């Protein structure tokens, strides 16, 4: 079985220490943990308007990018990387924070709308909607008027721990995706722990 033909992973976030621990930077958290777990390190790459690490995940060589353009111009950075390395959108996985999932719940998704997320909106403008996503649940503050302060705030300790645990689970699922298939990786991530008995994955159609 051929694994997922992935070439690049992009974590979305805002540059600067003041944003580093905020919910909106969950995509950066994923990129950092993925690179560190594979012995990679980031270096500034002005041509890509971001920081880039080169890693090997199982048998797959991957580029890991953290745009430093600020969230609403993320597409500029990703497009520059894709053009330089001749990478198709469907070979790019974008990790981003997701208000519509509980903190610590992570889901793979292929294509779809941007849902009002400024980083995804920028990616749509530059790449279209055919890229892969890793939706990192951060929870919702309960009212749209509170969203801005919420995403730019630091999560409570329990939520932060849940998000990081979910990220580690997603890295394990990504290993399955690149060695076996996207569907196998999706099944591993979406099936609740304790019910992985070979049945259909929860949210397998997402």
Image (tube, helix red, strand yellow):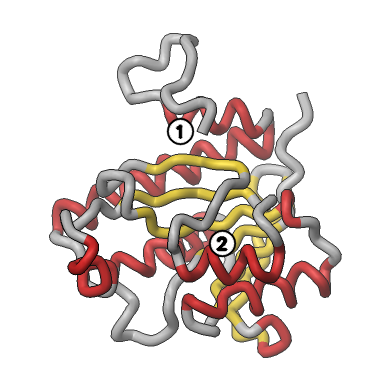
Q: Are marks 2 and 1 in contact (CB under 8 Å)?
A: no
Q: Residue 41 in the image: x percent, y percent?
A: 56, 72
- Left or right of 2 on screen, residue 148: left
Q: Secondary structure under badge 2?
A: loop
The residue nearer to you, when weighing 76 against 25, is: 76
Q: Can you say which quadrant of the picture contains the N terminus?
A: top right
94 versus 121 height, above or below: above
How far apart are the alpha carbons under marks 2 and 1? 23 Å
Q: Residue 25 in the image: x percent, y percent?
A: 38, 69
Marks 2 and 1: which is nearer the front?
1
For image coordinates 67% across by 66% down, the residue present is 54
Q: Which residue is identified by label 1?
A: 189
Q: Earlier in the sequence, mark 2 or mark 1?
A: 2
Q: Which residue is identified by label 2?
A: 39
The residue nearer to you, when weighing 14 against 58, is: 14
Q: Hey, which quadrant is residue 3 in on the image?
A: top right
Q: Residues within 10 Å of mark 1 (few under 14, many from 20)?
A: many
Q: Residue 46 in the image: x percent, y percent?
A: 67, 89
């Amino acid at each position: 079985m051929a694994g997922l033909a992935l070439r690049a992973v992009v974590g979305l976030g805002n540059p600067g220490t003041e944003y580093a621990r905020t919910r909106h930077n969950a995509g950066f958290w994923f990129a950092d943990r993925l690179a560190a777990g594979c012995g990679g390190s980031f270096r500034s790459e002005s041509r890509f308007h971001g920081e880039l690490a080169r890693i090997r995940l199982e048998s797959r060589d991957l580029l890991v990018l953290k745009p430093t353009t600020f969230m609403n111009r993320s597409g500029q950075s990703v497009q520059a990387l894709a053009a330089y390395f001749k990478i198709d959108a469907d070979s790019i996985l974008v990790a981003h924070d997701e208000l519509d999932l509980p903190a610590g719940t992570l889901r793979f998704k292929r294509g779809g709308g941007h849902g009002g997320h400024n980083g995804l909106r920028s990616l749509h403008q530059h790449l279209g909607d055919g890229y892969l996503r890793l939706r990192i649940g951060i929870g919702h503050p309960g009212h749209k008027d509170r969203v801005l302060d919420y995403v730019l705030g630091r999560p409570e300790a329990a939520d932060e721990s849940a998000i990081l645990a979910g990220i580690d689970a997603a890295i394990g699922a990504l290993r399955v995706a690149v060695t076996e298939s996207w569907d196998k990786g999706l099944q591993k991530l979406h099936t609740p722990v304790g019910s992985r008995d070979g049945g259909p994955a929860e949210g397998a159609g997402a």
